Amino acid sequence: MKRFLPKSEFGRNVVTLMTGTVIAQAIPIAISPILTRLYSPEEFGLFALYMGLAAILSVIVTGRYEQAIMLPADDDDAANLVVLSLTITVIISLLTLLLIFFTSDKIASALEKPEIEAWLLLLPVTIFLTGIYQTLNYWNNRKKQYKTLAKNRIYQSTTMSIAHIGGGFISGSGIFLIFGDLIGKFTSASFLALNTFKKDSSSFIDIRKDKQISLAKRYKKFPIFDTGAALANVSSYQIQNILFPIFYGLSSAGFYFLVLRVLQAPLSLISTSLTDVYKQKLTDPKTTENDLKRYYKKMFVFLFSIGLPPLVLFMFIGEELFSFIFGSEWQVAGEYAIILAPMFYIRFIASPLSYFLYLKEKQEINVLGNFTFLICSLASVIFFKSAEDVVIFISVTFSLTYIAYIIYSFKLSKSNL
């Protein structure tokens, strides 16, 4: 076995995070055939609507300062960025709670889904836990705690899945899908918090407000540029979860959400695992410009190779797979999967490579790209009357934009900027 394991630290770190990620994603995907028989497409549609709102709010909950935690050479600066990010998380979560408390009925009315009003009160909790997780995930990545991160993803996935199944057997109400997600997020955030306190508490001795203010100014491009870019990026994917229930019904939203669960989730988290290790390598002070070019090429070939088999599988038998695994009621989701598979493959390649935009501090380009995604998403709903036409338009336009990301990242890998 040792002969087949990577010899470099970088390779071993990738394998560690990917192993945890694959296991973590295998669990919810494995139980999906159970959930599609416990919950209806309509319940999944409401859950998709809630998660779409939560995902968009989660983008701003940290002010995007968690993205900067990897960058300082000094751990004291990084620790102050952690505290800054957590402080912003608390403030944004409380403001969201106040907003929803006084306007939940109006929000539900605007969404034309009065049944979601009671669920909205859980949104501040969801984004609060997400902000803690995102911040501490970057800190543990900085400290090369890859085994911890791998275990954490497994724990989160396991607790969430158990809660989802249990809730399905109790009533099959979509509220248990939300509770399951909250339980998973709570487990994940708590585990990282305990690990950080246990192993790195000494790094948080010199926490000062003046230093946090200075660092907030130093990395101001993250809230100024990256927040808009990330909002546009997340909204471009989540807007369908919000608008599908309004324009095409809850069932279409449920079908689309299942495709995201089966295609996007595993590819995104595998890609995220690679990116997490990739970030640490690219930001290493010892990394030269020649190293950057070499890392780009190696990562491109690796991503292209491991993403190709799933693409071919879904393109040929996606519809039959969905009908067989999830039940005949979900056949339309299989049709969506075939259409979206090429786009997810190109995105899988582009996501880790686009970190060069952060490395070279080209966040403004990321803003442009992500607003392109958002405009395409909104245009798809405005100009097309059927959900299938929307899915086709999204697949084509998003694929072209991700190809542009790959090309521009390649140019950055060769520049000395």
Image (tube, rainbow, N blue to C red):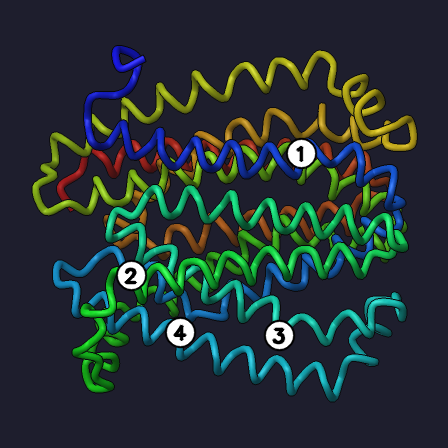
Pick whichever of labels 1 and 2 is earlier in the sequence: 1
What whole-number distance in Å separates the C-alpha atoms at marks 1 and 2?
A: 32 Å
Q: How many marks?
A: 4
Where is residue 319 shown, x and y percent of the image? Answer: 79, 20
* Residue linked to disc 1: 29
Residue depicted at 69% across the width and 53% down the height: 378
What whole-number distance in Å separates the C-alpha atoms at marks 1 and 4?
A: 31 Å
Q: Residues within 10 Å of mark 1 (few under 14, many from 20)?
A: some
Q: Is residue 393 left or right of residue 323?
A: left
Pick whichever of labels 2 and 4 is earlier in the sequence: 2
* Residue linked to disc 4: 86
The kind of residue on which mark 2 rests is Ala
Residue depicted at 10% across the width and 47% down the height: 285
Q: Are marks 3 and 2 in contact (CB under 8 Å)?
A: no
Taking 165 as reference, is 217 above or below it? below
What whole-number distance in Å separates the C-alpha atoms at marks 2 and 4?
A: 13 Å
The reply to whether residue 248 is in sight is no
Where is residue 379 shown, x and y percent of the image? Answer: 70, 49
Pick whichever of labels 4 and 3 is earlier in the sequence: 4
Q: Are marks 2 and 4 in contact (CB under 8 Å)?
A: no
